Amino acid sequence: MFERANELLREFKKDGYLHGMDVLSEVGKTAARAGSRAVLLRPGFRGADAFLRTIRDSVSDAGVSLLDEIKGASPNAPREDVSRIRREIEKAGPDMVISFGGGSTIDAAKAAIALVVLGGDIEEYFGTGLVTCALEKSGGRILPHVAVQTAASSGAHLTKYSNITNRETGQKKLIVDEALVPRYPVFDYRVTFDAPPVLTADGALDGIAHSLEVLYGAVGRPFYDKMTEVASECISLIVRYLPAVLKRPDYPEGREALGLATDLGAYAIMIGGTNGGHLTSFSLVDVLSHGRACAIMNPYYTVFFAPNIEEPLRLVGKIYEKGGYMEAKFDRLHGRDLGMAVAEAMIRFEQSIGFPSTLGEVEGFSDAHIERALEAAKLPQLRMKLENMPVSLAAETVDEFMGPILRAAKSGDLSLIKNV
């Protein structure tokens, strides 16, 4: 079952990824490859205790000492949690870190591990490649990281990204660095069976956002053909299985499909980079989860990008057509009209699972979020998101073109979007 998805993941991680059903009891063997003295970051979700017992027993049986257990991070990995985790790792003095949690805990662990070695303030490392640069100058070495994922969502256990939030400003920033990729990733898909419907849907749509945005930005690049394979498999699995899992949360085939799909989303963001949807999501952290923000925004960016991404749109359109969400005869459409048809199918799918389709439906959203998103898009530390867009924007053109996208997302009126 799911042969192609598993083939792609083997291609991605070779033999370095422990994943599947009922693999949690093997965490100890993985940890023993990394060291002998560990700290364990643990989550607080209901039902975590049984999984934690399995990890503790497995680690002990493998001869690894647990020096301390540290509370994981709150949603969106606040800077305060990164600082706290850093202090507790430094106090324990382990030779490796085991993080068991969702994307926020794993992202916080990545950042904290870097700060343990490099010191300084996290603000110094937002951007691309700055951790590696600092390691080369200092001769430091990142602690081995056993990242045990609990949510079919961000793929943080497989990637070079660490998303960290400043609660005071409501703005998320990003560290992008190969040095942060966890050396020992683990994901037992059975851990996701008790995930609430909201988390399940948000996570799956985050997986779509990863593949979709990288696919859009891959046009004309050497990795485009590979991205069509990864995105096609990822998006197809989610469109097919997410509605079924929301109706029956303990559906094993569906849960495995979502785990594989979001892992493929992680593969996507290691091939290329995300762009518009993710960029805007970083300014909506106080009113929306990350996956939900990306899901709302991507149909609107689809219309904006449409004249430059016809081939990807046809691939994506066929997936939504097969799922019964495409009403237009999109094979005869081109440019903006094609983008409109695919965007409407995406919105139709999201509405079918109870997602909001506009920012205006989101409690707490205001025009201040639009202004915040426009200003954030001009920050040098987030420039990579603009550069990854299939329609090139510079800081000086953000207001002219991104402003209408955000206003369209507020109202649901796709006609407001201006194409370059």
Image (cartoon, rainbow, N blue to C red):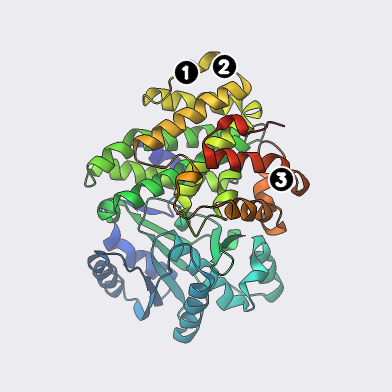
Tag in front: 2 or 3: 3
Which residue type carries mark 2? Leu
Could you tell me if residue 278 is visible in this image?
Answer: yes
Toward the viewer: 159 or 65? 159
Q: Are marks 2 and 1 in contact (CB under 8 Å)?
A: yes
Q: Which residue corresponds to mark 2? A: 333
Picture quarter containing residue 35? bottom left
Which residue type carries mark 1? Ala
Relative to 71, does residue 380 appear above or below in the rendering?
A: above
Give x and y (percent) for residue 102.
40, 60
Q: Are marks 2 and 3 in contact (CB under 8 Å)?
A: no
Q: Of the residues under marks 1 and 3, which one precedes in the sequence?
A: 1
Relative to 261, does residue 336 appear above or below in the rendering?
A: above
Q: Which mark is residue 399?
A: 3
Toward the viewer: 14 or 196? 196
Which residue type carries mark 3? Asp
| Residue 326 relative to residue 125: left or right | left
Where disc 2 sits, the SS reads: loop
